[in-house]
Image: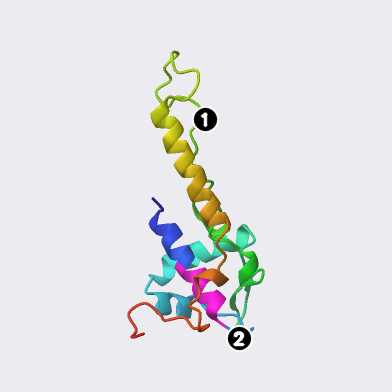
Amino acid sequence: MISQTTEYALRAVVHLAAHTETDPVRAKDIAESINVPTGYLQKILRMLCKHGVLTASRGSSGGFNLARPPESITVLDVLNASDGELPRINRCPLGLPCHADLCPLHRLLDAQMESIERVFAGTSLKDLINKEGGWVAIGQPQ
């Protein structure tokens, strides 16, 4: 349903949301913590900066931070930044002239995409951090 790029983007931003210090976090540190190749993650982080989800600072103490508080960044924001908008069905995908309106199958599929979009839009990064406020890195004991 979502691409590997989006999966990595979500893991990275949730990691940053749980990072309580205000100092920027280096891409290498994020990559190690979420078990993602550093080079690939750097491209994803730059893309998230371009779309206003993250900010970046250069230099020896540089790195990445969330551009806004975790409660104001949604899963849909991250998905749109990494993969573009969720596909919706507005017309018959087969181009059949007899389907001027959506057929029952395509109406159902589009309704489900709309439902998923609503859930993603209503889920913030803060919602994805465990209730104790901590974040358990991939591969580490809970």
Residue visible at 43% across and 13% down? 98
Q: Which x, y percent locates residue 85?
A: 54, 46
Residue visible at 48% across and 33% down? 89
Is 129 on the left-hand or right-hand side of 61? left
- Dot 2: few (<14), some (14–19), or many (≥20) neighbours within 10 Å? few
Residue visible at 58% across and 61% down? 74
* Element on which disc 2 rests: loop
Please tell me whether mark 1 or mark 2 is closer to you in this view.
1
Residue 55 at least partly seen? no
Task: Please identify the quarter of the rendering in which residue 63 is found.
Answer: bottom right
Which residue is tagged 1?
A: 90
Q: Nearer the viewer, residue 29 or 104?
A: 104
Task: Please identify the quarter of the rendering in which residue 37 is found.
Answer: bottom left
Residue 29 at least partly seen? yes
Range of the magenta residues? 11-19
Q: Which x, y percent locates residue 126?
A: 57, 72
Q: Which x, y percent locates residue 32?
A: 40, 79
Residue 81 is inside the magenta segment? no
Residue 90 sits above or below residue 20 on the image: above
Image quadrant where one finds the C terminus: bottom left
Instruction: Tell me the amino acid under the disc marked 2.
Output: Glu
Q: Earlier in the sequence, mark 1 or mark 2?
A: 2
Which residue is tagged 2?
A: 21
